[in-house]
Image (tube, helix red, strand yellow):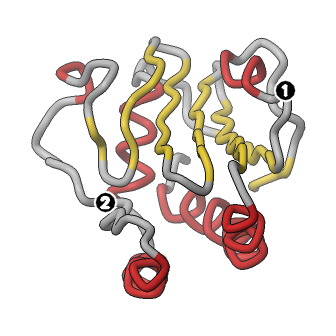
Amino acid sequence: MISAIDIPPQSEISRHLNGAYYYDCYETAVKPTSQSALALYLQVVAGTPGWINTLMALRNRVVSLVGLKNLGGLGDFDATKPASDYRVGDRVGIFSIRYLSEQEVILGDTDKHLRVEVSVCRGQDKVAVSTVVHIHNLLGRVYMLFVVPMHRLIVPASLRNARFL
């Protein structure tokens, strides 16, 4: 079961909430695991549902018309590279790693219209995926009008598809 929850107060990303335009968090149960937070993230994006990849491709085409960057796809990363080989600053699909520990990974991207950060924070038998967005201008506000409704579908669908149990 996937539930919308508050961003875990002990998470590093909770320190990024000040001034955020948008944030949310979804949690799901996982089998007890020694996998790192990054390994769990890689598992989620590796199993990205096809309809999400189609939406990302459409997004990339549309935003190029207003000068925003093509992010590629969520699952555009080297699936053979172990999670333990990644470091802060490395690119993983559409995001770069900004914070990395065994319990939490924060990935993000910044463009002229907004800064987005995604955290995967693992507990003993749960994983929480948080998103925090800071907008920079009117374009960011307009962009978020379209992104928020889709985001609320994409994160739970991605967690369901990861099959943690």
Q: Nearer the viewer, mark 1 or mark 2?
A: 1
Q: Quadrant of residue 19?
A: top right
Which residue appears at 45% of the width and 13% of the height?
Answer: 102
Quadrant containing the N terminus in the rendered view? bottom right
Judge by depth and name the residue closer to the eye, 24 or 141. 141
* 1 and 2 marks in contact (CB < 8 Å): no
- The residues tagged by marks 1 and 2 sit, at their Cα atoms, a distance apart of 29 Å
**Position above or below: 139 against 5:** below
Residue highlighted by disc 1: 18
Q: Can I make out residue 54 in this image?
A: no
- What element does badge 2 sit on? loop
Q: Which mark is residue 96?
A: none
**Position above or below: 125 against 24:** above
Q: How many numbered discs, if any?
A: 2
Q: Position of residue 164 (x, y in %)?
A: 52, 47
Q: In the drawing, does residue 39 fall left or right of residue 113?
A: left
Q: Quadrant of residue 150?
A: bottom right
Give whichever of discs 1 and 2 has the lower sequence position: 1
**Position above or below: 76 against 40:** below
Say what amino acid the circle numbered 2 marks. Gly
Residue highlighted by disc 2: 75
**Position above or below: 1 against 40:** below
Q: In the drawing, does residue 82 fall left or right of residue 156?
A: left
Which residue appears at 36% of the width and 43% of the height?
Answer: 42
Q: Position of residue 151 (x, y in %)?
A: 68, 66
- Residue found farthest to the left: 80
Judge by depth and name the residue closer to the eye, 36 or 110. 110
Say what amino acid the circle numbered 1 marks. Asn
